[in-house]
Structure formats: structure tokens, C-alpha cells
Image (cartoon, rainbow, N blue to C red):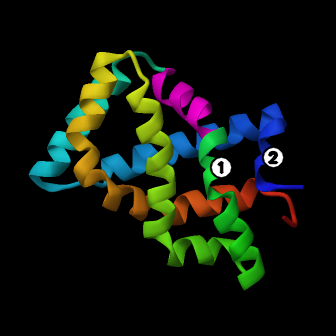
Amino acid sequence: MTLSDMLNDSNTKASMVQACTGLIDQQVAAKGGVSGLAFKATYSLVKGLGPSYIPGAIDRLLPDIVTALEPMWAEGWQAGDPVQYLQQNSDRAADQVLSVTDRRIAGSNNGVVRSSYQKLRKSVKGDVAAAVPGLAKILDAHAPVAS
């Protein structure tokens, strides 16, 4: 069973979407300073598209993100602890996550989302890398026992 297989269970996927939505909300709330205000404003704008927009986006992105992280997760299993491995390689994991979002945004016809993403993209890698430990724990909580 692979890491991606866990998304075949609708309850597991829903739980992961909820956990990832909470993680993003926490990361955004923790942002400070002037750049944090801009980030929070942009996030609020995107959330303003509807209460289900962020969870819906996560639901759509999660399969590709899990697939992108699967090789690193397997490397982590080989190293003895996939959560710790992702945490120690958070920049690489962030690049994998952002490669998925970059592809999706490039194909988006939602101008508000595309414009907002493009404004924040240059500075967001550090934020995504900072979220990797939380994402790794979410994956671990839902992952099959062995990959």
C-alpha cells in the first residue's frame, strides 16, 4: 500500500482536507509584520470566494501533492522515520508541493486566485517549508503502516 492509497478512502481524505485547512489557517494567522498583513489580506480575499473554497482547493490538490511527496516519504521509511525525514528536508518537500500548485495555478481560469498566487509566489516557499512539519504529521496520522 502506498501513501497515495490512503486518499481512496473518502473519510480519510476528508479528514486530511480538514487537517490541512487547519494547518494553513494556523500558518497564516501566525504571520507577522507588514508582509504578514499583506499575506493575511490576500488569504482573506481568497477565502472570501466562499467558505468551501480553501477546503475545495485542498481536496483538488491533495492527490497530486501526496503523489509528489510519495518518493520522499518512501526515502523517509528507508531512513527509519518519514516524518522526521520530511522535516529535515523541508525545502525539498516545499519545492515538491509548490511544483503542484504552480502547475494548477498556471491552468486556472480564476483571475483573483491566479493574481493573488502570483503576487505571493516568490515569498511563499519559506512559508510552505515552515508548514512541512505539520503536513508530515498529517500524512503520518493517515498513512498506511508501511509503504
What residue is shown with label 1? 66
The quadrant in which the C terminus is found is bottom right
Q: Position of residue 95 (x, y in %)?
A: 44, 58
The quadrant in which the N terminus is found is bottom right
Q: Nearer the viewer, residue 103 or 136?
A: 103
Q: Which residues are magenta?
A: 52-62
Name the disc covering residue 89, or none: none
Q: Nearer the viewer, residue 95 or 9?
A: 95
Is residue 115 shown left or right of residue 73?
A: left
Q: Residue at x 77, y 55 (%)?
A: 3
Q: Residue at x 51, y 56 (%)?
A: 96
Residue type, numbered disc 2: Met
3 part of magenta stretch = no
Q: Position of residue 107 (x, y in %)?
A: 43, 25
Q: Residue at x 55, y 25 (%)?
A: 56
Q: Quadrant of residue 39?
A: top left
Q: Is residue 19 above or below residue 52?
A: below
Mark 2 to mark 1 CA distance (whole Å) = 10 Å
Q: Residue at x 19, y 49 (%)?
A: 36
- Contact between labelled residues 1 and 2, with CB atoms less than 8 Å apart: yes
Name the disc covering residue 6, or none: 2
Helix, strand or loop under label 2: helix
Q: Position of residue 24 (x, y in %)?
A: 44, 45
